[in-house]
Image: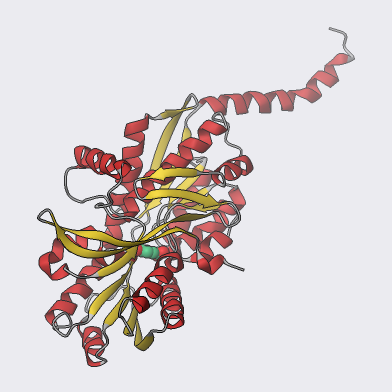
Amino acid sequence: MPARRLPRLLALLPLALAAAMSAARAEGPIRIGLLLPFSGPYADYGVEIGHGVDLYITQHGDTVAGRKIELIRRDVTGVAPDVAKRLARELVTRDKVDFLAGFGLTPNTLAVGPIGTEAKKPMVIMNAATSIITEKSPYFVRFSFTLSQIVTPLGEWAAKHGFKRVYVAVADYAPGHEAEAAFTKAFTAAGGEVVGSVRIPVNNLDFSAYAQRIKDAAPQGVFLFVPSGEQPIAFMKSYVDLGLKEAGITVLGGTEIIDQAVIDSLGDKALGVISAQNYSSAHGSAENRHYVAAWTAAFGPKPKPNFMSVAGYDGMAAIYRVIDKLHGDIDPEKAMDEFKQIRLESPRGPIEIDPDTRDIIETVYIRRVERVDGELVNREIFEFPRVKDPAHAP
Ligand code: PHB
């Protein structure tokens, strides 16, 4: 080789090395960091979302576009933004994940946002539900719901179905504030009156004083949002013990207040509770019947799949679709473009991602706890199709 060609070849070396490294990388596993509470008061998020993710992988195999899928689970333990931040940093820098996913609670999700943005990692939200989150990073995409999206239809429905006087009780953190504002706006615009309101600390587990205040205000209903977990069960206990049910005060749930696990722990006392949500395990579609059957075969009859489980399942379906479309070569910008095109027939009904907001468009169901074929379930009694998050509206 002529000596004068050598410097040119040497100059090309870094490029060749980079190409070889990226080819090697494209043959290794695709890593997904799953950040969720797997312990502590919100451990059921890890169970429900984790099972949804696992079920999708079991059904569809752990290789996509020739690349193995490696899940790395990290336990954020509760409302713990600093823990979430530290774990996200490790996932990005040490584990070199291609996607971050999970995201159960708003405060943790907001804390991780800047890390995902800086590292350019698509962040697939499988629960956290405050509207503002997706505005905080172009790498967020949401497969759950937003509080405004769910409780706006509920407020409208309640005012049009005989509820004129309602008390509003919410957890005192961002999702609670959003639920309070959205319900109040929709309910009063449709002619209802809010007769009192209270914000409850997010870790509170004794609701007796709050339940008494609500009873004293003698409303027809109480609109309640507290995060899924131990709080809904604790509230419902006080609701029953203090006689709010006998006093004719109906619980109108913001989403998770009457999840199937809450129904199971309350028994007949749950009868009549009304809630709005994007999923009920009693949903009557063929997709859902298959989903519930596969879930039961994999994990047993309890817990039943809930709204978090379908967000895990659908979020994983979307990640698989994106990897496939990109032929296994994960460029973050191209991945986000693909997420914006997602449309799926979910166990909850049809879903799509709004390309302008990266938030989900889905059916919101109004459900009432009833006994169907001997079982207590959230039976769908009304539906609002293709609901977008109203909080993002200009
Ligand atoms: C949230 O923190 O965003 C959150 C948590 C639990 C829910 C809904 C929203 O059930």
Residue at 56 percent across and 44 percent down: it is 341
Q: Position of residue 133 (x, y in %)?
A: 52, 62
Q: Residue furthest top?
A: 1
* Residue 84 versus residue 4 in the image, above or below: below
Q: Residue furthest bottom?
A: 216
Can you see residue 79? Answer: no
Q: Is residue 149 left or right of residue 255?
A: right
Q: Position of residue 277 (x, y in %)?
A: 34, 61
Can you see residue 58? Answer: yes
The picture quadrant where one finds residue 174 is bottom left
- The quadrant of the image that shows the N terminus is top right
- The quadrant of the image that shows the C terminus is bottom right
Question: In the depicted view, which residue is nearer to us: 88 or 241?
Answer: 241
Residue at 52 percent across and 37 percent down: it is 322
Residue at 22 percent across and 38 percent down: it is 298
Q: Position of residue 253 (x, y in %)?
A: 30, 70
The picture quadrant where one finds residue 357 is bottom right
